[in-house]
Amino acid sequence: MTLSLDSPASAPPLDRRGLAGALLATATWALTGTFIHLVPGLGAPTVAAVRLVASAIVLLAFQLMRSRSSFWPAVPWIGVCAMAAYYVMATEAFTRAPVVEVTLLVGSAPVVTLVVELVLGRRVRALRMLGVLIAVAGLAAFLIPAMRDAPRSALGYVFAIGAACVSALYVTTLRARAARGIAVDAIAIATRASLVGAVASALIVLFGTGVSAIHLSARDLGVLALLGVVSTAVPTVAYGEASKRLPPTVTTSLSLLTPLFAALIAGATLGEWPAPARLPGCLLAFVGIGVVVLSN
């Protein structure tokens, strides 16, 4: 467990391409909950299966168009399975709880990442740790009133926390490989994560509700296709790029910006505006994110 008290000036500047990837992932993931809430009649495994099949098709097509020597390069399977689990659990969470609350809970990944970094004995800047703690405090202030008033969402919260944990595992895995000089192909990882998640979700559907019980309209397929491309394939690749270029706590902390976009989108399209009394907690979370980013 190592804390670094070095001045911010001694740290290398953050990779711009990594920052761009993290922000793109943040913006496109913000649409996830809204897309899922637009198909309320479908179960989470069905949504996840169609979503990930659409994502896999797009990513496979992109891989075919790339001029690479290997169409199927080696990938870290821990990272692949972690991202596949993330999408399955996040979909389950969004079908059970309000969009903004799930997005904020999933955004608690920075504290999980921080704990992992400390356990592994890696250097963690004291200012960065302070920023993570501020962000998590704001997260708690935003969510605790909602958890008290809506216990029916408890299982959704559990799935959201699980998604945060596997997201942290994904980030630390890719960053560790990049730090050792091992090539990380974000698109190959995203493709296989989509395939693994699609198969797992399809099996849940097959042995759960059954395929015959599923009724997909043309509108449902359109929404799920957008979910698979815009809010799955694109952010997975972007997040993979960010994960190998930025410190893990920075990557996961930037994802806490997703609730801001999610709140605006969900409020405008679904009428799920958070109560004004809970907004200071959200603001505190964003202050913490700013401290994490500026700590570099």
Image (tube, grey):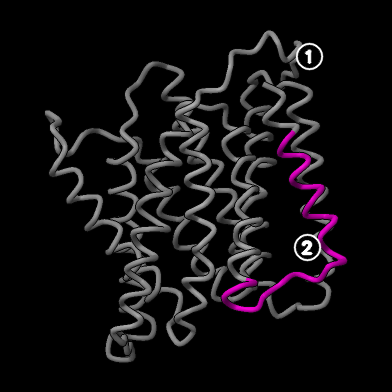
Q: In this view, does 5 lie above or below 28?
A: above
Q: Is residue 220 left or right of residue 174?
A: left
Residue drawn at 66 percent across, 66 percent down: 157
Q: Which residue is drawn at 30% across and 58% down?
A: 55
Span highlighted in magenta in the image: 267-290
Q: Is residue 287 magenta?
A: yes
Q: How crowded is mark 1: few (under 14 residues within 10 Å), some or many (20 or more)?
A: few
Name the residue tied to disc 2.
143
Disc 2 packing (10 Å; few <14; some 14–19; many ≥20)? some
The spot of residue 111 in percent (x, y) is 70, 41
The answer to whether residue 182 is above or below residue 75 is above
Front-most of residues 240 and 173: 240
Quadrant placement of the N terminus: top right
Considering the numbered disc 2 on the image, is that residue within a helix, a strand or a loop? helix
From the image, tell me which residue sits under label 1.
5
Q: Vertically, is 66 above or below 101?
A: above
x, y percent for residue 232: 39, 56
Name the residue furthest right.
277
**Mark number for residue 242?**
none
Spatial distance from mark 2 to mark 1, Cα to Cα?
A: 31 Å
- The prevailing secondary structure element of the residues shown in magenta is helix
Identity, as a three-letter code, of the amino acid under mark 1: Leu
Residue 98 placement, left or right of 287: left
| Secondary structure category for the residue under label 1 | loop
